[in-house]
Amino acid sequence: MTRIEGHDALHARLGRTPGASPEDARRTNRSLVLRALHLGGPQSRADLAKLIRVTPATVSSVVRELVDDGIVEELGRTTARHVGKPATMLGIRPDGRHILAVDLSSHEQFVGALVDLDGKVVHRRSLARHDARGTAATALLVRLVAELVDAAERPLLGAGVASPGYVHPDGIISNATHLGWDHVDLVAALRDVVDVDVHVVNDANASALAELTYGEHDSDHIVVVRVDEGVGAGIVLDGQLHSGSSGGGGEIGHVVTDPSGPRCVCGKRGCLETFVSAPLLAAPAGSASTTLLGQTGHALGAGIAMLVSAVDADDVVLSGSVEVLSETFLSAVHDAISERTLPHLADRLTVRGTSFLDADVLLGAAALVLDRALGIR
């Protein structure tokens, strides 16, 4: 699932920041080696030295450490014809570590998984939510994480939790209305059940991280819109996730689009998510009608048109249920945005479903751990 990039593109993305101490330099070089292998696929030690612009001796030292840690492995000698002894190729060892990832976005269940370093889900588990809120929701999360820890057959690199709501950069859920959470510290809640670092991210931002880390995309300006129990957006500008000054970037679900509209769970009237959400799309028969899909998709497109125009995004990615990923819904979103933006933007706009179906939020939580622990994004 790793996106392989060409040599010239890698140089541009592997820019280095000199460390202030030998330990900083060691961490920087370790991160650069891992990023090069993640983005560019298998490389020789000589290739790595050229890519990250350090001495062969430095690369050999870093690689030795990563091999001893079980994160990098030797893949055998290259078959390319070069003068001298064939080079030994190196690659990230997918099973060297597993990542514990959790997705709390569904109104029906909490979903967790163990994910390898290549983004492959190796074990998946879910617990029915039964409308758990507040401390009951926290207890359900703790139970799910404990079960995943017990199921792990490889050392854990870290744990990532993707939650709806306003997620502060320090891991505190400032507000998650549908889960009944107000200033809940998920890192502290999980401290006794998992002995690795825990990282928390908004679910829409997680979906955006999945696209950035594992997806195939041609644009570096992407708006990822997650439709589950509510609505949120992950904003990618110049190939980087932008979550705002305090982690609330993309929190569009409680923007009022019709002051005379239905009462929202937040107390206001006519918030965007009173017109667009997974429960609203779930018709009694189990699938939404074409008319409902069109109307709801149009409402979402109208709600995000200004955001798309403001950041000049040319790639809109939708994440959520099968209804959200349907052609009818996607087309309605595209039409509504096009009707409300300038032709130069509408003409190059792409609206598509997530590359990962129902695994995007899990993979995004895993990608966050990869970035925080190894610095490979």
Image (spheres, rainbow, N blue to C red):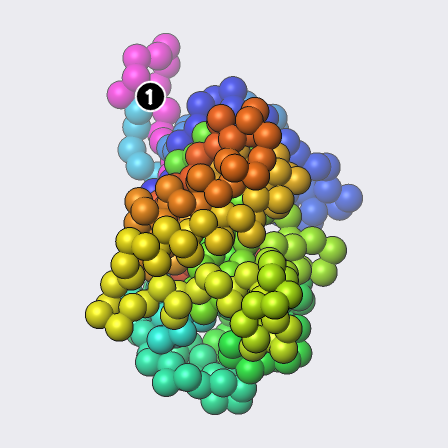
Instruction: Please tell me which residue is depicted at 77% across the width and 44% down the height of the picture.
Output: 20
Residue 41 magenta: no
Instruction: Please tell me which residue is depicted at 75% across the width and 46% down the height of the picture.
Output: 21
Question: In the picture shown, does residue 187 fall above or below 119?
Answer: below
Query: What is the magenta range?
Result: 79-95
Tell me if residue 347 can be seen. Answer: yes
- Which amino acid type corresponds to the residue marked 1 in the rendered image? Pro
Residue 82 magenta: yes
Q: Quadrant of the N terminus?
A: top left
Q: Quadrant of residue 187?
A: bottom right
Q: Check disc 1: other Cα within 10 Å, few if <14, some if 14-19, many if 20+.
A: some
Please name whichever residue, 333 or 182, is drawn nearer the observer in this view of the structure: 333
Question: In the picture shown, does residue 369 fall above or below 17?
Answer: below
Q: Residue reaching furthest right?
A: 20
According to the picture, the residue beneath numbered tag 1 turns out to be: 86
Estimate the x, y position of residue 344 in percent, counting from the top left.
56, 24
Tell me if residue 98 can be seen. Answer: no
Please name whichever residue, 128 or 251, is drawn nearer the observer in this view of the structure: 251
Question: In the picture shown, does residue 167 fall above or below 372?
Answer: below
Q: Residue reaching furthest top?
A: 83
Q: Secondary structure at mark 1?
A: loop
Please name whichever residue, 302 or 93, is drawn nearer the observer in this view of the structure: 302
Estimate the x, y position of residue 117 in percent, counting from the top left.
39, 51
Instruction: Please tell me which residue is depicted at 56% across the width and 52% down the height of the picture.
Output: 303
Instruction: Please tell me which residue is depicted at 48% across the width and 63% down the height of the picture.
Output: 275
Q: Is residue 294 left or right of residue 191?
A: left
Q: Quadrant of residue 76?
A: top left
Estimate the x, y position of residue 300 in percent, counting from the top left.
49, 53
Question: In the picture shown, does residue 312 fall above or below 212?
Answer: above
Q: Is residue 79 left or right of residue 107?
A: left
Estimate the x, y position of residue 263 in percent, counting from the top left.
57, 75
| Total number of numbered discs in the rendering | 1
